[in-house]
Image (tube, rainbow, N blue to C red):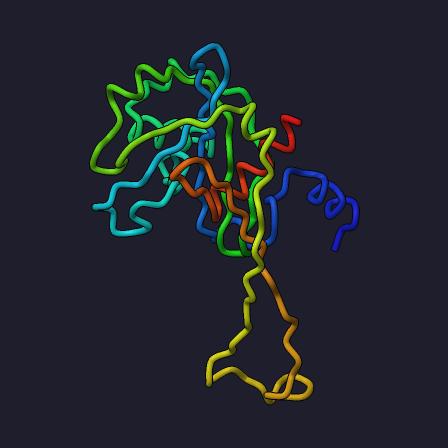
């Protein structure tokens, strides 16, 4: 092994985390719209006809396809497919830190300014039930609340317990997940969307 060559390899751009290449990778856009003289964050209510998470509140986004040039390209494509926004009219402001939900799931969030009036005329009703906005000022003034969700490790019956110390009596580390909630009128924003939103609002502050 050549240590100089190894050093050069380690200096080169690496994956974000071990397993990123095989993880489910998705990208979302936090759309900022100007309405009534102030900035709002726009949200989607997923169509009740959707097979997964119908009625949930989300940002436009989805899986990064092999044909997408980058996570940002995927976020722009999904925004166009869901909200009908021409990517050339979107002003991408920046990228947030990726959210690594697990070694098999990572989300790349972006922030962009878009035309609210264009959205209200063109969103895809097969995927989006409705759109609504929340003033950034309101989000800055109202803290979300949090609940903890316990996560248990449950190895399958064919797990090779005989290979590890203490076998089937091994003490797996307990995990808990913070779930954040924003309440705005009749809307409840939680889960992945609330987690990314909370991070974004902390940056704005």
* Viewer-proximal residue among 175 and 170: 175
Query: x, y percentage for residue 54?
Result: 29, 48
In the picture, the quarter occupied by the N terminus is bottom right
Q: Quadrant of residue 43?
A: top left
Residue toward you, 123 or 4: 123
Between 109 and 36, the residue placed more toward the observer is 36
Residue 11: x percent and y percent? 72, 39
Find the residue positioned furthest to the front.
185
Q: How many marks?
A: 0
Quarter location, residue 77: top left
Q: Residue reaching furthest top? A: 37
Above or below: residue 162 compared with residue 112: below
Residue under the point 55% across and 84% down: 160
Q: Position of residue 86 (x, y in %)?
A: 32, 18
Residue 204 percent coordinates (x, y): 63, 26
The answer to whether 195 appears left or right of 128 in the picture is: right
Give the quadrant of the C terminus: top right
Q: Is residue 100 above or below residue 78?
A: below
The residue at the point 25 percent across, 51 percent down is: 51
Q: Is 55 placed left or right of 43 in the picture?
A: left
Q: Residue furthest right?
A: 3
């Amino acid at each position: 092994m050549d240590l100089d060559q190894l050093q050069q390899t380690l200096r080169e751009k690496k994956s974000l985390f071990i397993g990123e290449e095989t993880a489910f990778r998705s990208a979302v856009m936090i759309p900022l719209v100007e309405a009534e003289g102030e900035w709002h964050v726009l949200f989607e209510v997923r169509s009740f006809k959707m097979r997964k998470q119908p009625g949930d509140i989300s940002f436009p986004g989805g899986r990064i396809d092999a044909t997408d040039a980058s996570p940002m390209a995927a976020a722009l494509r999904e925004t166009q497919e869901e909200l009908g926004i021409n990517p050339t009219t979107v002003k991408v402001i920046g990228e947030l830190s990726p959210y690594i939900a697990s070694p098999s799931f990572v989300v790349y969030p972006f922030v962009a300014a878009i035309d609210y009036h264009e959205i209200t005329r063109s969103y895809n009703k097969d995927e989006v039930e409705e759109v609504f906005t929340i003033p950034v000022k309101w989000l800055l003034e109202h803290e979300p609340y949090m609940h903890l969700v316990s996560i248990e490790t449950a190895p399958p019956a064919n797990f090779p317990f005989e290979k590890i110390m203490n076998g089937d009596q091994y003490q797996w580390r307990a995990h808990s997940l913070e779930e954040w909630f924003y309440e705005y009128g009749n809307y409840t924003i939680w889960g992945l969307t609330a987690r990314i939103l909370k991070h974004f609002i902390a940056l704005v502050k």
